[in-house]
Image (cartoon, coloured by chain):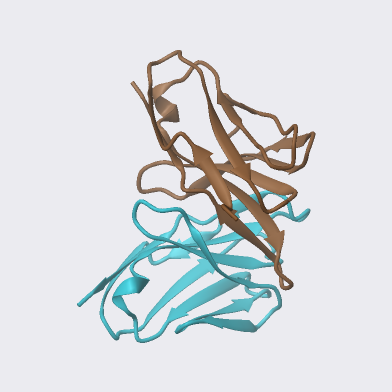
Chain colours: A brown, B cyan
Amino acid sequence: NAGVTQTPKFRILKIGQSMTLQCTQDMNHNYMYWYRQDPGMGLKLIYYSVGAGITDKGEVPNGYNVSRSTTEDFPLRLELAAPSQTSVYFCASRQYSGTGYEQYFGPGTRLTVT
Amino acid sequence: QQPVQSPQAVILREGEDAVINCSSSKALYSVHWYRQKHGEAPVFLMILLKGGEQKGHEKISASFNEKKQQSSLYLTASQLSYSGTYFCGTFDNYGQNFVFGPGTRLSVLP
Protein backbone atom coordinates (compact mmCIF):
# COMPACT_ATOMS: atom_id res chain seq x y z
CA ASN A 1 0.00 0.00 0.00
CA ALA A 2 1.94 3.00 -1.28
CA GLY A 3 -0.60 5.63 -0.15
CA VAL A 4 -0.38 8.88 -2.14
CA THR A 5 2.49 9.17 -4.60
CA GLN A 6 3.58 12.24 -6.55
CA THR A 7 5.93 12.69 -9.46
CA PRO A 8 8.26 14.38 -10.11
CA LYS A 9 9.84 15.31 -6.78
CA PHE A 10 11.60 18.33 -8.21
CA ARG A 11 11.24 20.31 -11.40
CA ILE A 12 12.60 23.53 -12.84
CA LEU A 13 10.52 25.21 -15.53
CA LYS A 14 11.18 28.19 -17.70
CA ILE A 15 8.58 30.94 -17.87
CA GLY A 16 5.87 30.00 -20.35
CA GLN A 17 6.51 26.27 -20.28
CA SER A 18 3.82 23.76 -19.31
CA MET A 19 3.91 20.60 -17.25
CA THR A 20 1.73 18.05 -15.51
CA LEU A 21 2.20 17.07 -11.89
CA GLN A 22 1.14 13.50 -11.32
CA CYS A 23 -0.72 12.23 -8.26
CA THR A 24 -1.85 8.66 -7.64
CA GLN A 25 -3.45 7.01 -4.62
CA ASP A 26 -4.07 3.33 -4.06
CA MET A 27 -6.49 3.61 -1.13
CA ASN A 28 -9.65 3.88 -3.25
CA HIS A 29 -10.48 7.30 -1.79
CA ASN A 30 -13.08 9.33 -3.63
CA TYR A 31 -11.93 12.77 -2.50
CA MET A 32 -8.62 14.16 -3.69
CA TYR A 33 -7.03 17.58 -3.28
CA TRP A 34 -4.24 19.71 -4.71
CA TYR A 35 -2.57 22.29 -2.48
CA ARG A 36 0.30 24.67 -2.97
CA GLN A 37 2.57 25.85 -0.20
CA ASP A 38 4.76 28.90 -0.70
CA PRO A 39 7.93 29.19 1.40
CA GLY A 40 7.12 29.77 5.07
CA MET A 41 3.42 29.87 4.40
CA GLY A 42 0.38 27.67 4.89
CA LEU A 43 -1.27 25.43 2.33
CA LYS A 44 -3.78 26.82 -0.12
CA LEU A 45 -6.29 24.68 -1.98
CA ILE A 46 -6.02 24.78 -5.76
CA TYR A 47 -8.55 22.19 -6.91
CA TYR A 48 -10.36 19.24 -5.46
CA SER A 49 -12.31 16.27 -6.75
CA VAL A 50 -15.13 14.34 -5.11
CA GLY A 51 -14.85 11.41 -7.49
CA ALA A 52 -13.98 10.37 -11.02
CA GLY A 53 -15.24 12.94 -13.50
CA ILE A 54 -16.03 15.60 -10.87
CA THR A 55 -13.69 18.45 -10.04
CA ASP A 56 -14.10 21.90 -8.52
CA LYS A 57 -12.04 25.00 -7.85
CA GLY A 58 -10.47 25.81 -4.54
CA GLU A 59 -9.07 29.10 -3.32
CA VAL A 60 -6.28 29.62 -5.90
CA PRO A 61 -7.19 27.85 -9.19
CA ASN A 62 -5.92 30.43 -11.70
CA GLY A 63 -3.18 29.10 -13.94
CA TYR A 64 -4.00 25.45 -13.24
CA ASN A 65 -6.23 22.74 -14.62
CA VAL A 66 -7.14 19.30 -13.36
CA SER A 67 -8.85 16.17 -14.57
CA ARG A 68 -10.05 13.04 -12.81
CA SER A 69 -10.66 10.18 -15.20
CA THR A 70 -10.06 7.43 -12.61
CA THR A 71 -10.40 7.12 -8.85
CA GLU A 72 -6.65 6.62 -8.52
CA ASP A 73 -5.24 9.54 -10.54
CA PHE A 74 -5.61 13.29 -10.14
CA PRO A 75 -3.08 15.16 -12.33
CA LEU A 76 -2.52 18.89 -12.05
CA ARG A 77 -1.67 20.79 -15.24
CA LEU A 78 0.26 24.06 -15.28
CA GLU A 79 -0.14 26.05 -18.47
CA LEU A 80 2.22 28.93 -19.26
CA ALA A 81 4.25 28.71 -16.06
CA ALA A 82 4.94 31.96 -14.21
CA PRO A 83 7.41 32.74 -11.39
CA SER A 84 4.42 33.16 -9.04
CA GLN A 85 3.82 29.42 -9.41
CA THR A 86 7.12 28.60 -7.74
CA SER A 87 5.96 26.55 -4.79
CA VAL A 88 5.71 23.10 -3.26
CA TYR A 89 2.67 21.22 -4.49
CA PHE A 90 0.98 18.60 -2.34
CA CYS A 91 -1.64 16.15 -3.40
CA ALA A 92 -3.89 14.57 -0.78
CA SER A 93 -6.74 12.11 -0.54
CA ARG A 94 -9.14 11.73 2.31
CA GLN A 95 -11.03 9.00 4.05
CA TYR A 96 -13.63 8.85 6.78
CA SER A 97 -12.06 7.62 10.00
CA GLY A 98 -15.18 7.13 12.08
CA THR A 99 -14.97 10.54 13.69
CA GLY A 100 -14.29 12.68 10.65
CA TYR A 101 -12.29 13.02 7.47
CA GLU A 102 -8.52 12.57 7.55
CA GLN A 103 -6.34 13.72 4.70
CA TYR A 104 -3.32 11.73 3.57
CA PHE A 105 -0.66 13.73 1.79
CA GLY A 106 1.83 12.79 -0.86
CA PRO A 107 5.50 13.77 -0.43
CA GLY A 108 5.14 16.88 -2.59
CA THR A 109 6.61 18.27 -5.80
CA ARG A 110 8.99 21.21 -5.48
CA LEU A 111 8.58 23.43 -8.53
CA THR A 112 10.75 26.37 -9.49
CA VAL A 113 9.82 28.66 -12.38
CA THR A 114 12.61 30.91 -13.66
CA GLN B 1 -12.25 32.29 5.17
CA GLN B 2 -8.92 31.21 6.61
CA PRO B 3 -8.76 30.38 10.33
CA VAL B 4 -6.44 32.49 12.46
CA GLN B 5 -3.70 30.90 14.56
CA SER B 6 -1.69 32.22 17.48
CA PRO B 7 1.08 32.47 18.29
CA GLN B 8 2.92 32.56 14.95
CA ALA B 9 5.93 30.91 16.50
CA VAL B 10 7.00 29.52 19.86
CA ILE B 11 10.31 28.26 21.21
CA LEU B 12 10.35 25.77 24.07
CA ARG B 13 12.82 23.78 26.08
CA GLU B 14 12.30 20.05 26.20
CA GLY B 15 9.72 19.22 28.87
CA GLU B 16 7.89 22.56 28.71
CA ASP B 17 4.25 22.98 27.73
CA ALA B 18 2.71 25.01 24.92
CA VAL B 19 -0.72 26.03 23.72
CA ILE B 20 -1.60 26.83 20.11
CA ASN B 21 -4.87 28.56 19.36
CA CYS B 22 -7.06 28.47 16.27
CA SER B 23 -10.11 30.65 15.73
CA SER B 24 -12.47 31.58 12.93
CA SER B 25 -14.91 34.36 12.20
CA LYS B 26 -17.14 31.77 10.53
CA ALA B 27 -18.97 28.96 12.29
CA LEU B 28 -16.76 25.94 12.79
CA TYR B 29 -18.31 22.50 12.42
CA SER B 30 -15.06 20.69 12.89
CA VAL B 31 -11.42 21.50 13.50
CA HIS B 32 -8.55 19.44 12.12
CA TRP B 33 -4.98 19.59 13.35
CA TYR B 34 -1.91 18.67 11.28
CA ARG B 35 1.81 18.78 11.96
CA GLN B 36 4.40 19.38 9.27
CA LYS B 37 8.08 18.79 9.83
CA HIS B 38 10.56 20.75 7.77
CA GLY B 39 10.73 19.50 4.18
CA GLU B 40 7.97 16.95 4.71
CA ALA B 41 4.26 16.66 4.02
CA PRO B 42 1.66 17.51 6.67
CA VAL B 43 0.60 14.63 8.89
CA PHE B 44 -2.85 14.32 10.42
CA LEU B 45 -3.03 14.61 14.23
CA MET B 46 -6.69 14.75 15.20
CA ILE B 47 -10.19 15.96 14.41
CA LEU B 48 -12.57 17.65 16.84
CA LEU B 49 -16.23 17.60 15.99
CA LYS B 50 -18.30 18.56 18.99
CA GLY B 51 -18.38 21.59 21.17
CA GLY B 52 -16.18 21.22 24.20
CA GLU B 53 -14.73 18.01 22.83
CA GLN B 54 -11.22 17.09 23.85
CA LYS B 55 -8.97 14.54 22.25
CA GLY B 56 -5.47 13.28 22.78
CA HIS B 57 -2.61 12.03 20.69
CA GLU B 58 0.52 11.03 22.61
CA LYS B 59 0.97 13.98 24.99
CA ILE B 60 -0.83 16.28 22.58
CA SER B 61 -4.46 17.08 23.26
CA ALA B 62 -6.96 19.57 21.91
CA SER B 63 -10.22 21.21 22.78
CA PHE B 64 -12.96 22.70 20.62
CA ASN B 65 -15.42 25.35 21.70
CA GLU B 66 -17.86 25.72 18.83
CA LYS B 67 -19.70 28.61 20.48
CA LYS B 68 -16.52 30.65 20.61
CA GLN B 69 -15.48 29.27 17.21
CA GLN B 70 -12.07 28.33 18.48
CA SER B 71 -9.87 25.36 19.19
CA SER B 72 -6.69 24.97 21.22
CA LEU B 73 -3.91 22.43 20.87
CA TYR B 74 -2.05 21.54 24.07
CA LEU B 75 1.44 20.11 23.96
CA THR B 76 2.48 18.71 27.33
CA ALA B 77 6.03 17.94 28.38
CA SER B 78 7.24 18.68 24.88
CA GLN B 79 9.77 16.44 23.19
CA LEU B 80 12.31 17.26 20.50
CA SER B 81 10.15 15.32 18.04
CA TYR B 82 7.33 17.83 18.52
CA SER B 83 9.21 20.47 16.55
CA GLY B 84 7.47 21.49 13.36
CA THR B 85 4.68 23.68 12.08
CA TYR B 86 1.18 23.03 13.39
CA PHE B 87 -1.79 23.83 11.21
CA CYS B 88 -5.43 23.90 12.06
CA GLY B 89 -8.01 23.65 9.29
CA THR B 90 -11.65 23.18 8.59
CA PHE B 91 -14.03 22.07 5.86
CA ASP B 92 -16.66 24.33 4.39
CA ASN B 93 -20.37 23.83 5.05
CA TYR B 94 -20.56 21.11 2.39
CA GLY B 95 -17.60 19.19 3.74
CA GLN B 96 -15.62 19.50 0.53
CA ASN B 97 -13.45 22.61 0.36
CA PHE B 98 -10.74 22.59 3.06
CA VAL B 99 -9.02 25.68 4.43
CA PHE B 100 -5.80 25.60 6.46
CA GLY B 101 -4.74 28.22 8.98
CA PRO B 102 -1.39 29.98 8.46
CA GLY B 103 0.42 27.70 10.89
CA THR B 104 2.35 27.97 14.17
CA ARG B 105 6.02 27.14 14.09
CA LEU B 106 7.09 25.21 17.19
CA SER B 107 10.75 24.72 18.02
CA VAL B 108 11.71 22.45 20.91
CA LEU B 109 15.29 22.87 22.11
CA PRO B 110 17.26 20.42 24.24
Find the residue positioned furthest to the top: A16
Counting from the top left corner in percent of width and height, residue B22 is at: 52, 67
Does B4 appear above or below A62? below
Residue A100 versus residue B27: which sits nearer the camera? A100
Residue occupying image coordinates x 46% and y 20%: A81
Image: B53 above or below A31: below
Q: In the figure, is residue B92 to the left or right of A13?
A: right
For the C terminus of chain B, the image quarter is bottom left
Residue B57 visible? The answer is yes
Above or below: residue A76 compared with residue A31: above
Count every numbered label the image shows and give the total.
Answer: 0
Q: Nearer the viewer, residue A10 or B88?
A: A10
Q: Is residue A70 left or right of residue A6?
A: right
Q: Where is residue B101? Give x, y as percent.
A: 51, 56
Give the residue at x 50% y 61%: B43
The residue at the far left in this view is: B110
Of residue B30 and residue A5, the one placed in the foreground of this image is A5
Q: Quadrant of residue A47?
A: top right
Q: Is residue B2 visible?
A: no
State the image coordinates of residue A56 (x, y, percent, origin top left): 72, 36
Q: What residue is shown at x 66% (from left), y 59% (from top)?
A: B26
Q: Position of residue A114 (x, y in %)?
A: 33, 21
